């Protein structure tokens, strides 16, 4: 069989595996957050109560959406300060065998904002910047907590849709603790064991000094990588210990680890669709969301794969075909696995990469940009994918309601002006941040001075940086120098606004929906459990993205694609 056949087999195996895991993981999460019994309860319930006593909180008291939001913001603000301080004191702290100095203030702020917001944008090289303690106590801990925050918000939104005439949407401390103890920790532990068995390093030993074949001395970085790699992908974080991320053989050594990491990235986002169905009492609702996500995901993969297989016509004209398309890609994985990984990581809010996105063809880069611009709702991040697509659900049922001349409804709740305003804010905030940030950087010398590629590709690099940070993704077109004070500070602020600027409208909708009474379905009620609604939902998501970002994309990757076929390269 040819390479294309094997690529299609891999995609089919990936979709089948993800679909099979969805009801299993989703059903388990529904039991966890509904307080039902699980196999882990005898061990974890005492630990859960100990955490509540240690923190001095009541994990079972119902919260209004405003109380939930205040607890969430306070907790994450504390995490931001803690991560910043650990980096600044790194030089005098233990577990620093390479004696790395304190991280500079600007990079420390950017990194703290990055890991607290589940972005994991890295304006630094991990091997030469962060000590083992910083990687573990600051970055890996936040990988758990930021993912748990996203899951908690998604569960609060589900409760808001499921409850009737209720004042509360749950308890943030309960949701956060259960996300960590029942979901992220046990599954990360199992995945880390598998990764170690495949060759992912896990050690506190100092870096190794070796002599190369040329007689040069080289330092080879090692680290406790497997433990961070597991939560990096499962929690859709993306920040790697090694600067080459998941293309580094110490993080992703085999095709099996590559496949498992891709599945892990989308598993929680996919599973939460089934959790929604279970908690609202109609699993068809969850499968509709899963179907809409899958439509967008497969269409995106097909476009990236086809574009990368065609490659650059200028190289083909020189007789350089086949292997030349692997520029920027790991030969271990090839074009198919690289295209699939690129689709997975930008469909989710995960910056993990197993190839150089800056080396993608213009249309390949266009698709990765578009997936982030759409809100990363094609399964999306841990929690953020579900509450992101639910914002689009509200917009879709509103449009359908206008078409049939009836007040829009979803899950027996009327969608009224307040919900539409909050949904609109949640959908538009990332777009506003992306476009304004790109425009500012494109006209200021501090922004354009970091461009390492001329022409439209340079604009694409700026656009990618602001898209990745506003969407809390973390991947990059690495041709842009983002280590300058302008980019570290601006992008750090943007990551915070992009994360919590969406979470607050989501919680507001959850609180208002929980207080509503159920509305019996009538003859004018549009069903939200069929193929038609899934197609409409996917269409609205793509349409909103096209209307918002097409002009910017036309100036960057689209014109670069046209010029490439006209014989010009950048």
Image (spheres, helix red, strand yellow):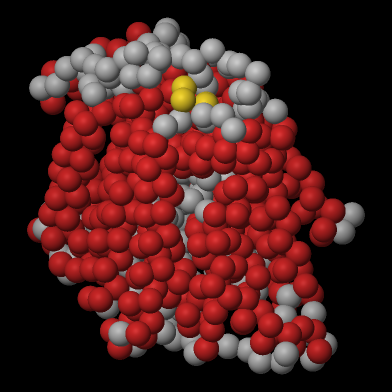
Residue 235 seen anywhere in this rendered image of the structure: no
At a point 13% along the width and 54% down the height, the residue shown is 85
Location of the C terminus (image quadrant): bottom right
Q: Position of residue 87 (x, y in %)?
A: 18, 58
**In the image, is 452 to the left or to the right of 551?**
left
At a point 15% along the width and 67% down the height, the residue shown is 105
How many marks do you count on the picture?
A: 0
Indicate the quadrant where residue 172 lies. top left
Q: Is residue 51 above or below residue 237?
A: above
Q: Position of residue 8 (x, y in %)?
A: 79, 50
Q: Is residue 388 above or below residue 517?
A: below
At a point 63% along the width and 23% down the height, the residue shown is 524
**In the image, is 24 to the left or to the right of 518?**
right
Q: Nearer the viewer, residue 560 or 47?
A: 560
Q: Nearer the viewer, residue 469 or 160?
A: 160
**In the image, is 110 to the left or to the right of 338?**
left
Indicate the quadrant where residue 93 lies. bottom left
At a point 30% along the width and 88% down the height, the residue shown is 445
Q: Position of residue 134 (x, y in %)?
A: 23, 53
Indicate the quadrant where residue 50 lies. top left
Q: Nearer the viewer, residue 337 or 115?
A: 115
**In the image, is 101 to the left or to the right of 355?**
left
Q: Is residue 452 above or below residue 517?
A: below
Residue 428 seen anywhere in this rendered image of the structure: yes
Location of the N terminus (image quadrant): bottom right
Q: Is residue 190 above or below residue 546?
A: above
């Amino acid at each position: 069989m040819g390479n294309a056949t094997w690529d299609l087999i891999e995609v089919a195996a990936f979709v089948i595996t993800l679909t099979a895991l969805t009801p299993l993981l989703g059903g388990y999460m529904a039991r966890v957050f509904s307080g039902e019994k699980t196999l882990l309860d005898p061990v974890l319930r005492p630990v859960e109560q100990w955490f509540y006593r240690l923190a001095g909180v009541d994990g079972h008291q119902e919260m209004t959406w405003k109380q939930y939001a205040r607890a969430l913001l306070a907790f994450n603000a504390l995490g931001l300060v803690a991560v910043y301080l650990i980096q600044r004191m790194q030089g005098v702290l233990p577990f620093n065998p390479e004696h790395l100095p304190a991280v500079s203030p600007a990079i420390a702020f950017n990194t703290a904002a990055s890991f607290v917001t589940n972005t994991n944008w890295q304006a630094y090289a991990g091997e030469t910047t962060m000590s083992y303690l910083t990687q573990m106590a600051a970055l890996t801990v936040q990988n758990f907590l930021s993912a748990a925050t996203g899951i908690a918000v998604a569960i609060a939104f589900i409760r808001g849709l499921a409850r009737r005439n209720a004042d509360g949407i749950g308890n943030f401390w309960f949701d956060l603790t259960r996300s960590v103890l029942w979901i992220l920790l046990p599954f990360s532990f199992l995945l880390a064991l598998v990764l170690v068995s495949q060759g992912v390093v896990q050690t506190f030993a100092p870096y190794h000094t070796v002599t190369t074949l040329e007689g040069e001395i080289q330092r080879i970085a090692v680290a406790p990588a497997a433990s961070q790699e597991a939560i990096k992908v499962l929690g859709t974080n993306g920040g790697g210990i090694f600067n080459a991320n998941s293309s580094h053989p110490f993080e992703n050594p085999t095709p099996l680890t590559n496949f498992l990491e891709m599945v892990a990235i989308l598993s929680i986002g996919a599973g939460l669709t089934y959790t929604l169905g279970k908690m609202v009492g109609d699993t068809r609702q969850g499968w509709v969301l899963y179907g809409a996500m899958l439509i967008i995901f497969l269409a995106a993969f097909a476009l990236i794969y086809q574009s990368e297989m065609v490659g650059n016509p200028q190289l083909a004209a020189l007789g350089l075909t086949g292997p030349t398309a692997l520029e920027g890609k790991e030969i271990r994985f090839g074009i198919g696995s690289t295209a699939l990984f690129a689709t997975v990581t930008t469909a989710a809010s995960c910056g993990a990469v197993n190839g150089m996105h800056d080396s993608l063809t213009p249309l390949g880069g266009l698709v990765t940009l578009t997936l982030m611009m759409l809100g990363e709702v094609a399964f999306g991040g841990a929690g953020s994918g579900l509450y992101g697509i639910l914002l689009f659900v509200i917009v879709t049922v509103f449009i359908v309601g206008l078409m049939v001349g009836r007040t829009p409804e979803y899950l027996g709740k009327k969608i009224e002006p307040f919900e539409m305003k909050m949904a609109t804010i949640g959908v538009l905030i990332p777009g506003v941040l992306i476009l304004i940030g790109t425009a500012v950087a494109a006209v200021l010398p501090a922004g354009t001075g970091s461009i390492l590629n001329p022409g439209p590709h340079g604009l694409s690099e700026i656009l990618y940086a602001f898209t990745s940070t506003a969407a809390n993704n973390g991947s990059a077109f690495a041709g842009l120098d983002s280590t300058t004070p302008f980019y570290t500070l601006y992008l750090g602020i943007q990551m915070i606004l992009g994360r919590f600027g969406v979470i607050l409208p989501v919680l507001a909708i959850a609180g208002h929906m929980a207080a509503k009474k159920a509305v019996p379905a009538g003859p004018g009620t549009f069903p939200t459990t069929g193929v038609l609604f899934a197609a409409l939902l996917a269409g609205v998501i793509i349409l909103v993205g096209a209307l918002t970002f097409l002009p910017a994309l036309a100036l960057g990757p689209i014109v670069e694609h046209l010029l490439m076929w006209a014989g010009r390269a950048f």
